[in-house]
């Protein structure tokens, strides 16, 4: 089964470290995001393979788990590009139905606004783990894919 538990643990650890590093550098964004994590927020990636992970508040930090939450306060379902768009502050991912919400839609919009307040340097966070050149390559591809996703969703 792909991805295996080792790869999944590595990916969630990278996301967790990058997110917490961004939060440490942005106290206002940290308060907004932690305020939106009233309970676990679960993400279901539907394509190209089903994958579930969840965000949990752990004091002044965020914990990313590779397992479904027992009782999530919010579930967000969609494709990887839509999640990348959400992470980069795209305010139309819910209204364009690129992401589906199960649970409190007001909490989903609060979570979206909190993410929009963050201004992290994801490439720098990835570069610490995989190097500058691969991180820049991946970052450029993600930005391009998010831009393409926005253009495709406009009627």
Image (cartoon, grey):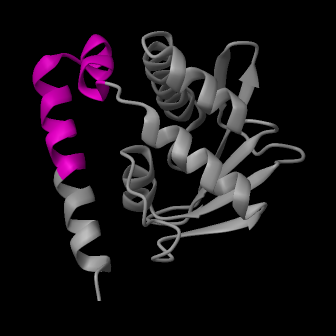
Asked which quadrant contains residue 35, the reply is top right
Residue 129 screen position, x and y as percent: 32, 15
Residue 154 screen position, x and y as percent: 28, 81
Name the residue at 76% across, 13% down.
Answer: 59
Name the residue at 65% across, 36% down.
Answer: 66
Residue 62 screen position, x and y as percent: 64, 23
Name the residue at 35% across, 29% down.
Answer: 119
113 and 13: which is toward the camera: 113
Name the residue at 72% across, 40% down.
Answer: 67
Q: How many marks?
A: 0
On screen, residue 138 above or below 112: above
Q: Magenta: predominant secondary structure element?
A: helix
Membership of 30 in magenta stretch? no
In the displayed structure image, the side of residue 33 where residue 106 appears, left or right:
right
32 and 126: which is toward the camera: 32
On screen, residue 151 above or below 109: below
Q: Is residue 16 visible?
A: no
Please state the extent of the stretch shown in magenta in the rendering: 121-143
In the displayed structure image, the side of residue 58 where residue 132 appears, left or right:
left
Q: Quadrant of the C terminus?
A: bottom left
Q: Is residue 149 visible?
A: yes
Name of the residue lying farthest toward the bottom: 155
Asked which quadrant contains residue 60, the reply is top right
Residue 130 screen position, x and y as percent: 26, 19
In the displayed structure image, the side of residue 53 where residue 96 appears, left or right:
left
Name of the residue lying farthest toward the front: 28
């Amino acid at each position: 089964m792909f991805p295996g538990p080792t790869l999944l643990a590595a990916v969630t650890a990278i996301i967790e470290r990058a997110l917490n590093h961004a939060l440490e550098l942005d106290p206002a964004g940290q308060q907004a995001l932690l305020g939106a994590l009233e309970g676990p927020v679960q993400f279901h990636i539907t394509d190209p393979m089903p994958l579930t992970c969840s965000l949990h508040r752990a004091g002044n930090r965020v914990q990313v788990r590779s397992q479904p939450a027992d009782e999530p306060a919010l579930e967000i379902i969609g494709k990887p590009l839509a999640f990348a768009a959400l992470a980069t502050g795209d305010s139309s991912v819910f209204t364009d139905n690129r992401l589906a919400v199960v649970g409190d839609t007001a909490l989903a919009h609060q979570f979206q606004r909190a993410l929009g307040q963050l201004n992290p340097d994801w490439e720098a966070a990835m570069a610490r783990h995989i190097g500058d050149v691969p991180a820049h390559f991946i970052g450029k591809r993600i930005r391009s894919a998010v831009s393409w996703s926005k253009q495709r969703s406009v009627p």
